[in-house]
Image (spheres, rainbow, N blue to C red):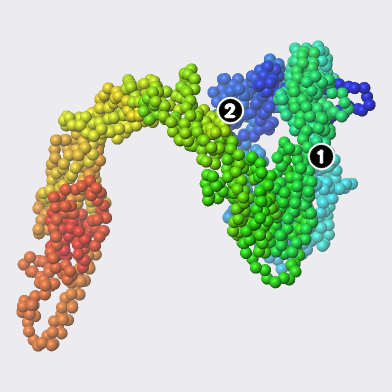
Amino acid sequence: MQLEIMPRKKRLPAGRAPLLLLLCQLVRALDVPLDSKLLEDLVQPPTITQQSPKDYIIDPRENIVIQCEAKGKPPPSFSWTRNGTHFDIEKDPLVTMKPGSGTLTINIMSEGKAETYEGVYQCTARNERGAAISNNIVVRPSRSPLWTKEKLEPITLRNGQSLILPCRPPLGLPPPIIFWMDNSFQRLPQSERVSQGLNGDLYFSNVLPEDTREDYICYARFNHTQTIQQKQPISVKVISAKSNRERPPTFLTPEGNASHKEELRGNVLSLECIAEGLPTPIIYWIKEDGTLPINRTFYKNFKKTLQIIQVSEADSGNYQCIAKNPLGAIYHTISVTVKAAPYWIMAPQNLVLSPGEDGRLICRANGNPKPRISWLSNGVPIEIAPDDPSRNIDGDTIIFSNVQERSSAVYQCNASNEYGYLLANAFVNVLAEPPRILTSANTLYQVITDRPALLDCAFFGSPLPTVEWFKGAKGSALREDIYVLHENGTLEIPVAQKDSTGTYTCVARNKLGMAKNEVHLEIKDATRIIKQPEYAVVQRGGTVSFECKVKHDHTLIPTITWLKDSGELPNDGRFTVDKDHLVVADVWDNDGGTYTCVANTTLDNVSASAVLSVVAPTPTPAPTYDVPNPPFDLELTDQLDKSVQLSWTPGNDNNSPITKFIIEYEDAMHEAGLWHHQTEVSGMQTTAQLKLSPYVNYSFRVMAVNSLGRSLPSEASEQYLTKAAEPDTNPTAVEGLGSEPDNLVITWKPLNGFESNGPGLQYKVSWRQKDGDDEWTSVVVANVSKYIVSGTPTFVPYLIKVQALNDVGFAPEPAVVMGHSGEDLPMVAPGNVRVNVVNSTLAEVHWDPVPLKSIRGHLQGYRIYYWKAQSSSKRNRRHLEKKILTFQGSKTHGMLPGLEPFSHYTLNVRVVNGKGEGPASPDRVFTTPEGVPSAPSSLKIVNPTLDSLTLEWDPPSRPNGILTEYTLKYQPINSTHELGPLVDLKIPANKTRWTLKNLNFSTRYKFYFYAQTAAGSGSQITEEAVTNVDEAGIPPPDVGAGKAMASRQVDIATQGWFIGLMCAVALLILILLIVCFIRRNKGGKYPVKEKEDAHADPEIQPMKEDDGTFGEYSDAEDHKPLKKGSRTPSDRTVKKEDSDDSLVDYGEGVNGQFNEDGSFIGQYSGKKEKEPAEGNESSEAPSPVNAMNSFV
């Protein structure tokens, strides 16, 4: 049996005896829905819902996942076979099964090879009702082998000859995609002359000189593994011939006059003919004794390939390809045979039967050759399966009669031939179930009159229930012939009328019970357009109005939409839409067209259209445009308690149509002189129905609006005083908050005069404790906004309401809000305060929450006070400023950041409410562990000598623990700014001075200095200094002077500064000689020596022969002697932020550089020193004279 929503329907014939509208019993497959709420107690045999493909090619680089999913009740268990034998998953550590599923995952990425798991797999899903099996899943790893090594000889041929370049790709799994490219990975151009065949070879019908190239490369792309293999390049050389002899076509492929092709049903049939000849042949295709299928035939490869998709047995026959050129034509016939793997004609469907019923499973398949049908029961060939007396096999059909619950099983039908197989699972489920109605109870259906109404009654039961419908609470079964009953239980009323409205009952019965369900039907009036828009002709610049009046069911709300030429209206202020009208002002030529009014409701829609034609205006004097004149002659009519009708006469529109009227009112009683917006109406209206409020002395005025603006207000209408009434609303923003521990302050936002609706506005204030049994306490107060209730308990929840009243009566019952009486300070301190020191700067604090009653207010949070009580390193007690951290809400822990290492802290915790803090918890003392120290406060180098430097320092300002030692690291810096080997030296913690000996003379050193505690090393401070050189520039013998001198003798002659200096000295001597010569010629003969002694030039000092020095040349700005000193301040104290020196400061500027031997040599320069060099005399920027002193 089956329960389905079927399109077929059964009409009760007219004129017959009254019949109950009953569902006939069907014998058809039923897939029982596993709905957890409705059908959770129904059992169902397993059904395979997902499985891997039959031919499953896997990527050997990834884990193997073989899918097998099934459903059933109870949930099925899973097992597997491999190559026909049981596959014990538990014995293979690489294989896992997904919980609640049969899907296997084979983890070959960690270890193992994909080839190990090649084979045929089959999954079985089993529960107490039977066993379903999957297809045979053939698992094979993809393969992308390399081309075999081969030596390809160059090909040389004459112009016009044919050519085939073989590809012969390696056999991969799946087969590769073939394409030809050159060395630049550019696809080779193909045409009617040159093309690639289905086998991958490259065919030339005739070659041309431009075909000459050395890089014809065949590529094979293996998509499964995303790899590309390439063949060795083929070289082709085409020799130009003097004359190209034309020739008729001959076939390059296929060979001969006839061939045979076999293809499977449903595949793509591909036939190929490639011919050679000169000129290039053209290919044509025909089918002998038939025509090519129009919608399934495609030509590829310049018509050399014929493809027919979704091929069937009808496509078998002889196909002929014809190759033609001007010298002749040839023919080739391909005989095509279409075979077919099995395909379903009727696959077996699941059966749900009740005990004692009959049924059948039908399995019909076709194929070429005809497939063989075999049956299995629960995965076992039916010939050896347990016998079932209710089962009889008749070829492709199993017939069941008088089934019982033990007849439940899963049957498999296998249809196979030499080209493949089909496997289908179908279960027989014997159930005894009373009827169940699955449609939701009391569903409401709404239908437009004269339209069909469909009332659902989805049901389930075994045996299949009969269904009948009733109308009304005590109605009889429907017997009229106007009803249509669908097989799924749906009742159809083909033409619903107003009298069809009511309650309908669906009743489902079988021999095990009865179920019923009620649904409701409402019939609505159709929406109609009773006043349609009409055709209009309007002059350019004029105004047109289309009317669309709609009548609809009073319970449906229509939406009116206007369209122009089936599209939206232009986004233009000239188009105005109100309830029943579309007005187009200042019409343009492109405003002409079809205008459609569409009325939509939730159940139906209607539309009506009209055409607008725009014509040229009649010539008239140029009009003057202005805002409208104000309306006049205002009149009040139909005066009621809460409404009035206002009418007026429009003023002149001043040649611009009035688009709307704005109506304003004044309340002379409460807000005299203040005008408020009342409403707006279309420019086509001259009356308006206005809603009014009680106890207001109304006056009205009207303003007209056109495209140029708004008119002046009209004169005010007569006054109209509406009757007083009780207030419509109550005060808003009602709150109850205490200002003191023993009171409750009730506040609200009072009504304004307009909202009072009458005289004598007052407020009834009521309150009572929320958790008590007291009656409401009420008091009536004047028109104020606050009332204070005294003598209340501290912080108790109260229910509060404030009701407005006036001389006429009370407003509606007000809403009840909750407030609290006043708060008081908390009574109890947090207990069980615990401190967990996380690290040297962070601690975590925990505490127990205080009882809610002791808070006596809204809990704001907890507040931690903490302060540093004692320095562990100095052991002197000193109190610092307390710090405070507040943790919002009901948190019972918090973190204290920013603590100082190796310190004693004290803290306490307090609870906070809206009133303030409660008492403090007992103080808790904790100590932070040691941390790493800060950098030493200062580092200075004193007493530099030829081979020693003395360092002095101050300890770290923040030791953060007990200093264990200092670490000094230093290294020399050579003339190329490279750092030498690093020396590491440990210094006791009690030292503040240290002398380094046996250093190299005239050498710059960089020092790194930091302190250590038990927690580790602190920040470092750096400094640089230079050892001294003696006045003669020759170091003492015991420091390796000979070696240094030898080094300088080798290096000095190649120095650029030395060459420059010598050139400059030569130039100066030449200039002096010229000057002396000129003066001698002018002034006569005199000794140069005497003249120079008498008038010594301050910029030129004579060379002193006794000490072997040259005079020093200096620019006019450089008369001052070179300064000696350090780069550091005079006290040689280096601050931490100044210690990050760079070697760029040495040797890269205009003042100095390093020689290869490490000495610091000043360059010849006309600029002042940028800054003093670091160190004592050895750090002075030497002049060229000093440089010469060191040259021996």
Of 242 and 710, nearer the camera is 710
Position of 831 with respect to 350 (left or right) is left
Q: In which quarter of the image is the C terminus?
A: bottom left
Position of 1067 with respect to 268 (left or right) is left
Callout 1–callout 2 Cβ contact below 8 Å:
no
Q: In this view, does 539 lie above or below 797?
A: below
For the residue labelled by badge 1, is the local secondary structure a helix, a strand or a loop? loop
Other-residue count near label 1 (Cα within 10 Å), few / some / many at <14 / 14–19 / ≥20: some
Position of 324 with respect to 191 (left or right) is right
Question: At 27% from the left edge and 27% from the top edge, which residue is drawn?
Answer: 907
- At label 2, which amino acid type do we have? Thr
Q: Where is residue 249 in the image (x, y as percent from the top left)?
A: 80, 57
Question: At 75% from the left edge and 40% from the top edge, which residue is drawn?
Answer: 552
**How many numbered marks have been drawn onto this rendered protein structure?**
2
Q: In this view, does 103 lie above or below 645?
A: above
Question: At 13% from the left edge and 65% from the top edge, which residue is drawn?
Answer: 1120
Q: Is residue 394 above or below residue 207?
A: above
Question: At 66% from the left edge and 21% from the top edge, which residue is drawn?
Answer: 37
**Location of residue 116 by image quarter:** top right
Of 175 and 947, nearer the camera is 947
Position of 171 with respect to 243 (left or right) is left
Other-residue count near label 2 (Cα within 10 Å), few / some / many at <14 / 14–19 / ≥20: some
Q: Mark 2 points at which residue?
A: 105
- At label 1, which amino acid type do we have? Ser
**Location of residue 302 by image quarter:** bottom right
**Res 825 visible:** yes
Q: Where is residue 1151 in the image (x, y as percent from the top left)?
A: 21, 61
- The dot on residue 312 is 1
Q: Which of the two labelled residues, at mark 1 and mark 2, occupies the earlier sequence position? A: 2
Q: Where is residue 402 in the image (x, y as percent from the top left)?
A: 82, 13
- The dot on residue 337 is none
